[in-house]
Image (cartoon, rainbow, N blue to C red):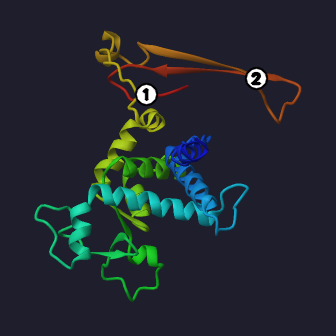
Amino acid sequence: MRERDSHEKSNVKHTVCVAVESDQPFPKALNIVGWVLRFVGNCKASSLKAGGPLTYGELMKAKVKLLYCAQREAFAKEINALALSQPLPKGSPLVKLDSYLDEGLLRIKGRLENAKLSFESKHPIIVPGTYIALLLVRFQHGLLKHAGVAVLVSTLRNNYWIIRLRQIAKRVCRECVACRRCEAKACSQPVASLPELRVKSAPPFTVTGLDFAGPLFCVDFPQEVVYSSFYLCCCQSCPPRAY
C-alpha cells in the first residue's frame, strides 16, 4: 500500500498560476513568460534559486522565448526547410526575404553586415503578422506617445521585421481612441447666405456696423478712463473702413 501511494503521488501534476499587473499586454506577456521560465529554472535541482523581481536578462530571455514560440507556430515548414538547407515552400511570406536561423530564431541577413549598427539592426528578428505582432505594435504606439504609421514602421524595423507591419500599424492607429480624437475633423455647418443689405450697392455708410470697447486705460492720462467706438461701413460698393 505504501509503495502504491508513493507511486500515485509521483504522478500528480501541479498547475502554476502567475498573476501580473500591467497596463500593456506585451509587457504583461513578457512578465508571465519570465515568471514561468524562472519557476522552471528553480525546479531544477542543480540550478541556483532565483528570487526577487524579474531582471533585465530574464525579460530578454522571455522575449526570445515568446518570439521563438510565435515563429514555430507560424513558420514551422520554413524553419524545417532552413534547418535542412532546403528551399522554402512556394507561397511562403519568407520567400522574398533573405532569412536564416540564428540560435533557433529567424532573422534577416540583409546587406548591412559592414554597417556600424547593432546586431539587432543589421539582422532584425522576423515576427509573424499574428496577435503577438499586434501586441508589439500597440506597445510601441503607446511608448512613442501615439506616433503615426510612418514613425511606428521606422522604429520597429530597427529590431524586428514584422510581416504586414504597415497594415498592422494602420489598424492600431485607427483603433486608438486618443488618435481618433486628435485627428477628427471639426464639424462644419453650411454657411448661410449674406443678408440683402450686405450684397446690394448703396452709398457709403448706408449700412454700418458699430463696435464698442472699454473701459481702457491710457498711459498719458493715468487718472482717466477711455472708451472707444468703431463704425464700420458694410456697403458692398466700398471696401471695409473703420472710423
The extreme top residue here reads: 196
User: Does residue 128 appear anywhere in the picture?
Assistant: no
Quadrant of the image occupied by residue 203: top left
Q: Is the C-beta separation of discs 2 and 1 under 8 Å? A: no
Instruction: Please state which of residues 140 and 205 is positioned toward the viewer in this rendering.
Output: 140
Disc number placed over residue 240 in the picture, else none: 1
Which secondary structure lies at badge 2? strand
The extreme bottom residue here reads: 114
Which secondary structure lies at badge 1? loop
Amino acid at pointer 2: Val
Residue ID at (41%, 85%): 115
Q: Is residue 65 above or below residue 200?
A: below
Quadrant of the image occupied by residue 163: bottom left
Q: Is residue 141 above or below residue 99?
A: above
Residue ID at (44%, 57%): 66
Residue 9 image point, x, y percent: 57, 44
Amino acid at pointer 1: Pro
